[in-house]
Amino acid sequence: MADRKPTSAKKLDPAQSPRAMYGAELRFQRERAGLSQAALGERLFVGHSLIAKMESGERRIQPDMAEQLDRVLDAGGFFVRNMAAGRATPHREDFADVAELETAALTIKEWEPLLVPGLLQTAAYAMAVIRAADPVLAGSEARARQKARLDRARLFDNPSCPTYWAVVNEAALRCAVGGPTTMAEQLRHIIEMIHRDRIILQILPLSEGAHPGMNGGLRLMTFEDDAPMAYRSGADSGSLVDDAATVKRHTLTYDLLGAAALSPDVSLTLVEAVAEEYEHAPEVRPDGGDVA
């Protein structure tokens, strides 16, 4: 690469999306270097579609990628220096890339052992989960987390994709998160999503006993241009992998769970029955008495 004066890094405008500004700088530096998206992708050993998504702000730039961009584009340290702004997200760090990737997924398959999956949660249910995990969390932060979770469900506004298939433990239906009213609303929302043909749902009955999903939640995602990915989640952390052998192993786990679960039609009948139970259950006051 020919010698040239370092280009001054552009100041990120806080009035605009930091991610978009970060991506605009990537496009500027790439064009300054005389490289197409495909050519830059070849130098970084990634596909041109990833470069395009980073430039548009659809994908976060990973720390190791920021270092490579500074080196390949001779960007004067811009990408490492401004990495925090480019990776800003309302989601937990280990889940942020998952939330980003699900918007580009062709298929999402999810196993949830304890809760209603985040993409299907109502506002009241989500807030009850957030408050249970952190009772002293500031109200503004709790609402921000709730909004971030609900915003993810906008992907269902696309009538064609992704195809979403969830296997959920019956325990998630039986645990009265937020009380009977919240649970009834939550289950009716799931029922509506099924009737709208936006999701496929199977319930793993409690009678199944030991099963291959006891170690935590699982999500499998496929993409048009990228390799399939798997995300394994625990109580406070998770890991996103694209290693083919690992994804294959997690896919087997999901297939076994689906084989053990109730069929979609029987699962819908169960969800409807439990929703009706909650609708007829008395609310409980904080002092333990029934609400009149």
Image (spheres, rainbow, N blue to C red):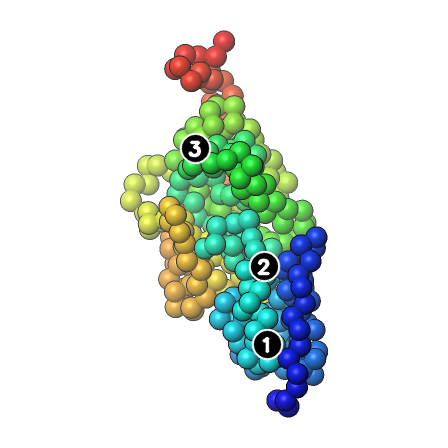
Tell me which amino acid carries mark 1.
Answer: Gly
Which is more toward the observer, 78 or 19? Answer: 78
Query: Which one is in front in this view, the residue at disc 2 or the one at disc 3?
Result: 2
Residue in the picture at 70% in, 52% down: 15
Q: Which mark is residue 135?
A: 3
| In contact (CB < 8 Å): disc 1 and disc 3 | no
Q: Residue at x 46, y 24 (%)?
A: 179
189 versus 21 height, above or below = above
Tag nearer the camera, 1 or 2: 1
Which quarter of the image is occupied by the N terminus?
bottom right
The spot of residue 27 in percent (x, y) is 68, 72
Residue 21 vs residue 267, the one in the foreground: 21
Query: Relative to 78, does residue 2 appear above or below in the rendering?
Result: below
Q: Write down the residue under mark 2.
A: 85
Q: Could you say which is closer to the camera, residue 215 or residue 51?
A: 51
Marker disc for residue 76 = 1
x then y, percent, for residue 9: 65, 70
For mark 2, does the 10 Å Cα neighbourhood hold few (<14), some (14 to 19), or many (20 or more) residues? some
Three-letter residue code for mark 3: Pro
**Which of the marked residues, 1 or 2, is nearer the chain's N terminus?**
1
Percent from the top left, x then y, of residue 170?
Answer: 40, 36
Residue at the far left in the pictured view: 210
Give the CA distance from mark 2 to mark 3: 29 Å
